[in-house]
Amino acid sequence: MKHAPADSLNILVVDDEEGFRDLLKWEFVALGMNVETASSGDEGVALLTTIRFDVVVTDITMPRMDGLKLLEHIKTVSPRTEVIVVTGFSAVETAVYAMSHGAFDFILKPYDINDLLLRVKKAAEAYTQCRSCGRSAA
Amino acid sequence: MPFLWTERGMTATDAPRPKVLIVDDEAGLREMLVFGLTDRGYDVSVAADGDAGISMVETRPFDLVVSDIMMPGTSGVEVLKRIKEVQPTTEVIMATGFATLETAIESMKSGAYDFIPKPYELDQLCAVFGRALERRRLRAQVIKLQELNHMKYEFLANMIEDLRPPMTEIIEEATKILDRAQGDIVSRREEALKRITSSTRGLLRLTENIQHLSKLSTALNGMDQPDISRKE
């Protein structure tokens, strides 16, 4: 499997909890990734207009625009961007909704940071493969 | 009123009935679904366990499968994975009375169309079927359009390959004559040859533009296509 170099990956972290945002940013930057953060869905939307992200990690419950709405927006404007949904509330319906609307993965808080990093790497691989797969990607 | 699903959507005509497979170890539920779904226009088959379900999908095509997750022996998730190997376009709906987040996520990652908690109403299942069939129809349409598009650009590429050599030859020959390589020419003929050369160069540029457009369209075809995985 072809791995994209970490320094070429653009990651967006969307979470209204500053602690989670900072922790993830620190971890991703340590891996050499380019990281942007947003504290709400609509801040994320604004960043998406200027930057093409490989992977977005988003919380669900946020003021104004929630993570599921953001997921739908991303899949409309940049369908190849992989989205990992993170939430503190375990609900099968929400997970099914997120996955059927194109989420790459669904993770419960509190999560193991190494597990999350692994899933982000997998999502980035999926994005890279899609970018180079041409017609067969459909 | 019973409905049938065709390429154009729901209709009460004699169109082929959607083929549905029910995989569930509850005999009562299987019987209820056979009765209810047949009445609503579906061609229904049943399997009492995962292995029987896998054998059936390996031997005949189905449009839809609704599979229980918790069954003795082969689980519904294993059935789902096998279906996606042998019939990737078949839409699979997972049903269970004991939904866990892990099985739900694993089912969706493995390609399930939806996840329906038990007990469910027939109307509820039929609503999911309707959406799943619509997605199947849209997918088939996208594949057809992509194939058509591919054929169109292949035809253009071949046409350009055939057109370029004679056009290049026309320009070369006309240029030789204009350079007086074959002797002197009258001015009226010279003007005509200049017009021929200029028009042919224009045509060559046009073929190059078509070729660029073709390459661009092929590249874009693999990027950022609308996601049809969403249900609404």
Image (spheres, rainbow, N blue to C red):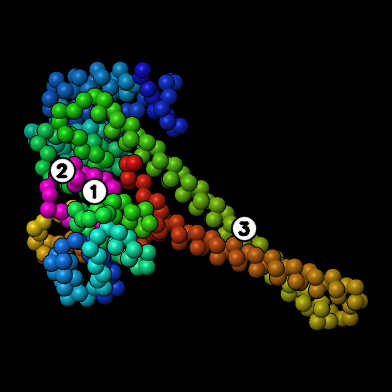
Q: Nearer the viewer, residue B5 or B165?
A: B5
Q: Residue A98 has which mark?
A: 1
Q: What SS does tag 3 mark?
A: helix
Residue drawn where x is 65% and y is 65% of the image: B206
Which residues are the magenta region? A80-104
Q: What SS does tag 1 mark?
A: helix
Amino acid marked by disc 2: Val
Judge whether A50 appears above or below B106 on screen: below
Q: Residue A92 has which mark?
A: 2
The nearer-to-camera label among 3 and 2 is 2
Residue drawn where x is 90% and y is 73% of the image: B188
- Residue B76 shows up from this direction: yes
**Residue designated by label 3:** B159
* Number of marks in the rendered image: 3
Q: Is residue A49 left or right of residue B148?
A: left
Residue drawn where x is 46% and y is 44% of the image: B144
Q: CA distance from mark 1 to mark 2?
A: 10 Å
Residue drawn where x is 91% and y is 76% of the image: B186
Callout 2 crowding tier (Cα within 10 Å): few <14, some 14–19, many ≥20? some
Q: Find residue B78 and report its image quarter.
A: top left
Q: Residue B205 has which mark?
A: none
